[in-house]
Image (cartoon, rainbow, N blue to C red):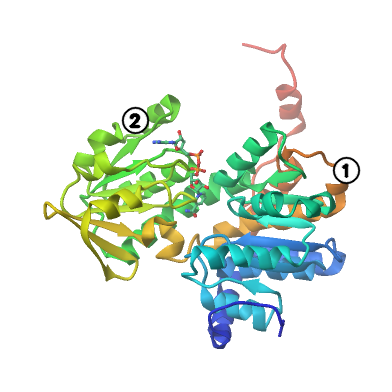
Amino acid sequence: MVTSYDVKDLGLAESGGLRIEYSGHHMPVLRLLAERFAKEKPLTGVRIGACLHVTTETANLMQVLKAGGAEVALCASNPLSTQDDVAAWLAVVLEIPVFAIKGEDNDTYYQHLESVIATAPQISMDDGCDLVFTLHEKHPEMLPSMLGGLEETTTGVIRLRAMEKRGALAYPVVAVNDADTKHLFDNRYGTGQSTIDGIVRATNILLAGRKVVVCGYGWCGRGVAMRARGMGAVVAVCEVDPLRALEAAMDGHLVMPVADAARWGDLFVTLTGDCAVLRREHFEVMKDGAVLCNSGHFDVEIDIPALRDMAQSVRRVRPMTDEFLLSDGRRIYLLGEGRLVNLAAAEGHPASVMDMSFANQALCAAYLAREGGSLERRVYRVPQEIDSEVARLKLAAMGITIDALTPEQEKYLADYQSGT
Ligand SMILES: NC(=O)c1ccc[n+]([C@@H]2O[C@H](COP(=O)([O-])OP(=O)(O)OC[C@H]3O[C@@H](n4cnc5c(N)ncnc54)[C@H](O)[C@@H]3O)[C@@H](O)[C@H]2O)c1
């Protein structure tokens, strides 16, 4: 067993192992990469510091990286997203340094980041940019030896692009989130399903006939709106981008400003990557019994301090469901403490979609190990060959074959002279 770790209870390792094995069966692309990495060892001697949601799927990724020869250390990318049995298994069986406890306070969260940084990583693997940011802020002496970084989510990529623009980014980072085989599937179908899963596990409410407000119609918002409607909810979308608002309208959803939606909705889900999307003026007009949750990366989309300030009392009425009793007698329910509801109240995305996201992570880690030294201090797209390979492998694993262009079609598509 590894000597350096901070997990809740090592005794949970066995049950974690069973769940990790089970999700591995739904990750055929990653399994294939594990075999390939074990033979080719593309990560030999490379130290990877990972700050990811510590779930069964992440444990499968850690196995691939280790099979490829990497030395990996892992901490949580959110205080509520750790699965304690998985963390235990990683320490006891995979023997990697792991620092993650579900419900850890903010100080512990940042201490855990420091513990990963203490392993002197050469590649950072982030979900939300906290590791990159801490390295830049607190450990500038380590930056020159970094081969590169990998970023899993939209919010992290937004922050990295801001760093790049201001000339503050000190090493190359690959925006894994922006691979087509990541955001088109993970953000849309993964967040779509697992956010509903988190809401239902936390509340056990019936979605049929319920008025659901989705704030943000990006890849995640589209997924949640689509799945909520599929379960019989009436969906209203709130947006700031005219194109996305138009798309929501033509997808058949109601579109309205959040000030109107606040009076109308029964259940509110934020997925904007923005702050203070739901705030005091909205809480003031919400119905008695309104349910609020967030599935965007940080817990700033709902103004929780304002809600707390308005409440006479707060009590936990079910796991991950807090009831705020307001002075006029209305009750507002907040799920998962305003943190990612799909990870706080459920298990995050299903393994079969993380299969693609994490195949991108593994292949991009190998790419950085190979090419990192020659890249500039920029945010890079995932190389097209990697994106296409992940799609090809996933299709094959699903038993789906597709057509290939005939020579005549190839010629036709390259031509501009033939017409009617
Ligand atoms: N829950 C999860 O497991 C999970 C998975 C992937 C991504 N995420 C996170 O979810 C968030 C959204 O990701 P995405 O890929 O859909 O991003 P995106 O950029 O595709 O979409 C965000 C949308 O929110 C809109 N928006 C911004 N501010 C707004 C406001 N004040 N009111 C209304 N709309 C607003 C934007 O116009 C945009 O259309 C990010 O924080 C991302 O990191 C969470």
Q: How many marks?
A: 2
Which quadrant of the view contains residue 45? bottom right
The image's mark for residue 161 is none
Relative to the observer, which residue lies in front, 88 or 35?
88
* Residue name at image x 38 percent, y 29 percent: 245
The image's mark for residue 249 is 2
Left or right: residue 45 compared with residue 381: right
Q: Is residue 25 above or below residue 265?
A: below
Relative to the observer, which residue lies in front, 377 or 245?
377
User: Residue 31: x and y, percent?
Assistant: 69, 67
Left or right: residue 120 compared with residue 154: right
Label 1, on which residue?
A: 374
Q: Residue furthest left?
A: 328
User: Is residue 224 shown to the viewer in this render?
Assistant: yes
Q: Is residue 265 above or below residue 238?
A: below
User: Is residue 25 shown to the viewer in this render?
Assistant: no
Rounded to the nearest angstrom, the CA distance separating label 2 from label 1 is 46 Å
Mark 2 vs mark 1, foreground winner is 1
* Residue name at image x 67 percent, y 32 percent: 165
Type of amino acid at the residue the image marks with label 1: Ser
User: Residue 10: x and y, percent?
Assistant: 58, 85
Left or right: residue 395 compared with residue 213: right
Which element is circle 1 on?
helix
Left or right: residue 306 compared with residue 68: left
Q: Is residue 16 above or below residue 294?
A: below
Marks 2/1 in contact by CB < 8 Å: the verdict is no
User: Residue 335: x and y, percent?
Assistant: 33, 59
